[in-house]
Amino acid sequence: QQQVKQSPQSLIVQKGGISIINCAYENTAFDYFPWYQQFPGKGPALLIAIRPDVSEKKEGRFTISFNKSAKQFSLHIMDSQPGDSATYFCAARASGNTGKLIFGQGTTLQVKP
Amino acid sequence: DTGVSQDPRHKITKRGQNVTFRCDPISEHNRLYWYRQTLGQGPEFLTYFQNEAQLEKSRLLSDRFSAERPKGSFSTLEIQRTEQGDSAMYLCASSLSRKFGNSPLHFGNGTRLTVT
């Protein structure tokens, strides 16, 4: 059962540009929405996260925008750099106390110099 | 760095053989999760432990799969009678569960299994 849908599947951006990755979810019981960054041969690493009572969160060049009514959230990478080239996953955590995350399918980002 | 450690990093096995993977979580973390990731997909939840208790198992975890966390520290994931469809990256993650919330999941670098 697909609970978190992520798009696009791949993205190419010029250095200095803005990268935007979108996610949509179905389950209104989700209470925490993290983004993970994964480099080849490595495990996913937490990048930034947001709770549904907040519409935007910014950490450095990374911003999450959250639209609770539309059940959508997005990651914006400002001033994209070649070092940002990686696969990005959105995720959602069900409320309750399992801590279990449901992941999107991933977006492979390539930032061209 | 005392992050999540997984061993081995790579495992090649023949169909029908049994394999076992080990995960050492961050030392103070009481929760441990196993995920499976196939090429081009996001991680899929398999199972998780709080201390030594296995609290949830996904339908993805067939009866050929078994996971343990005997003393609430490291965990093992065993796959019996491996099939080619078991080829994937097996990821372990850990977190600290507290009364008023959970810390984020921290992932290891995974064990890549290839079944020939």
Image (cartoon, coloured by chain):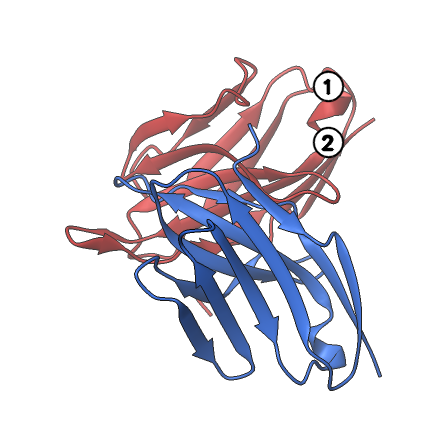
Chain colours: A blue, B red
Asked whether, in this view, residue A82 is left or right of residue B19, the answer is right
Which quarter of the image is occupied by the N terminus of chain A?
A: top right
Which residue is depicted at the point 42% across and 71% down?
A56
Q: Position of residue A58 (x, y in %)?
A: 45, 78
Which residue is depicted at the point 57% across and 33% down?
A2
Q: Nearer the viewer, residue A98 or B83?
A: A98
Q: Residues within 10 Å of mark 1 (few under 14, many from 20)?
A: some
The quadrant holding residue B96 is bottom left
Is label 2 in a helix, a strand or a loop? loop
Tell me the chain of label 1: B
Is label 1 in a helix, a strand or a loop? loop
Q: Nearer the viewer, residue A60 or B106?
A: A60
Disc on res. B97: none
Three-letter amino acid code at disc 1? Glu
Q: Position of residue B28 (x, y in %)?
A: 28, 57
In this view, B80 is above or below B3: above
Residue A42 visible in the picture: yes
Check if mark 2's residue and mark 1's residue have beta carbons within 8 Å.
no
Tell me the chain of label 2: B
Q: Mark 2 and mark 1, same subunit?
A: yes
Distance, label 2 to label 1, CA atoms, is 8 Å
The residue that mark 1 highlights is B83
The residue that mark 2 highlights is B87
In this view, B85 is above or below B6: above
- Mark count: 2
The quadrant holding residue A61 is bottom right
Residue B74 visible in the picture: no
Q: Nearer the viewer, residue A77 or B73?
A: A77
Three-letter amino acid code at disc 2? Ser
Which residue is depicted at the point 40% across and 54% down?
A68
